[in-house]
Image: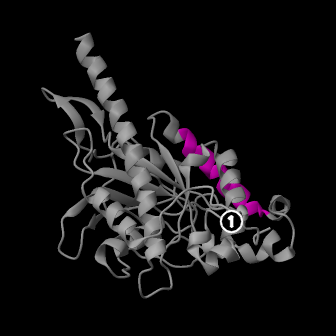
């Protein structure tokens, strides 16, 4: 049940001011292993209302030192984000840009011809969409006749070897338990696994979209990280104290379900709590958010290593 508390946290995390400072410093000093790449790009994909724009606002808030709202976010039945946006986070009000860019997208919807189109995701991964590109679900951008905005990561004598190799995929997944915890088993006193029967048809359709997105990512070898948002709404223990996130048996079960349904390792599922109603920052929320960014940068490093290996193979064959 949502009230189930595990005696010892199943993931180790330090909830101290010094830890927040350490995480922020690690992010500020991160340097991609590929010399021609200065920033890792993280693409946010997920259902309407999952918290994609709020995640950027929350990360931006941590580094600004106060709650910000640069990206439009809120509660709506349709996506408030209608453009492809690339957000650079700065280390303070007049600080330098951090070595990570968060790319925000239109939300996935269950209706046909609504929400983010899979073809647009493919275009983003190939670097064909500029900042502020207006999404049009009924007419996604196709390869024929489109202008190419991407820069080559590696080039030799004008020959392009790979394109936008720094693009890292960030998955945002939301199941019924998180989207509407009031209507799930937590309100009925049932076990979490029984809540499967309450999953609506619309969520099934959204899940199908995720399968299509996954297919689009397999070919370019883009790493995936799943952010489990609104964990405080799903579990009373976490709502009471975010430090209980890895002590909650219910949250652990949700994360295991996400891992199984999306086919990603449990280590690729990370819970976060975005800032949505607060006016002041919270140390523990900051640490959870920063820990997620650290994981993204580690995955980016893995991808850069793969790109470097492929480049080395090309050079050896010459």
Left or right: 128 with respect to 1? left
- In this view, the residue in front, 7 or 145, is 7
Report the magenta stretch's main SS: helix
- Please tell me whether residue 87 is drawn above or below residue 265 in the rendered image: below
| Residue at 46% in and 49% down | 121
**Residue 106 visible from this viewpoint:** yes
Residue 161 image-quadrant placement: top left
- Please tell me whether residue 191 is drawn above or below residue 316 in the rendered image: below
- Please tell me whether residue 266 is drawn above or below residue 105 in the rendered image: above
Farthest residue to the top: give it: 317
Residue 20 image-quadrant placement: bottom left
Residue 236 image-quadrant placement: bottom right
Q: Tell me if residue 41 is in the magenta stretch.
A: no
Farthest residue to the front: give it: 7
- In this view, the residue in front, 243 or 67, is 243
**Residue 132 visible from this viewpoint:** no
Q: Which residue is mark 1?
A: 248
**Bounds of the magenta segment:** 199-215
Farthest residue to the bottom: give it: 279
């Amino acid at each position: 049940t949502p009230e189930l508390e595990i005696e010892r946290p199943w993931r180790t995390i330090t909830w101290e001011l010094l830890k927040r400072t350490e995480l922020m410093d690690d992010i500020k000093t991160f340097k991609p292993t590929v010399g021609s790449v200065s920033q890792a790009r993280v693409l946010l994909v997920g259902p309407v209302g999952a918290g994609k724009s709020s995640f950027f606002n929350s990360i931006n808030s941590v580094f600004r030192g106060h709650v910000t709202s640069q990206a439009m976010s809120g509660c709506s039945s349709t996506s408030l984000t209608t453009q492809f946006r690339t957000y650079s986070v700065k280390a303070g009000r007049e600080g330098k840009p951090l070595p990570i860019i968060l790319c925000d997208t239109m939300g996935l919807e269950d209706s046909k011809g609504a929400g983010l189109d899979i073809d647009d995701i493919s275009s983003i991964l190939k670097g064909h969409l500029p900042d502020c590109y207006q999404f049009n679900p009924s007419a996604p951008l196709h390869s024929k006749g489109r202008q190419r905005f991407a820069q080559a990561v590696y080039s030799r004598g004008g020959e392009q070897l790979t394109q936008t190799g720094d693009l890292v995929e960030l998955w945002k997944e939301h199941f019924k338990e998180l989207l509407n915890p009031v209507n799930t088993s937590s309100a009925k006193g049932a076990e979490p696994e029984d809540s499967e029967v309450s999953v609506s048809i619309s969520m099934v359709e959204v899940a199908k979209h995720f399968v299509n997105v996954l297919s689009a990512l397999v070919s370019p070898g883009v790493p995936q990280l799943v952010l489990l948002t609104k964990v405080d709404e799903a579990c009373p223990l976490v709502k009471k104290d975010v430090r209980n996130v890895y002590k909650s048996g219910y949250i652990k079960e949700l994360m295991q379900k996400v891992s199984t349904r999306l086919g990603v390792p449990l280590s690729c599922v990370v819970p976060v709590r975005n800032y949505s109603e607060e006016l002041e920052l919270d140390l523990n929320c900051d640490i959870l958010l920063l820990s997620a960014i650290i994981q993204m940068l580690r995955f980016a490093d893995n991808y850069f290593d793969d790109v470097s290996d492929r480049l080395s193979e090309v050079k050896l064959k010459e």
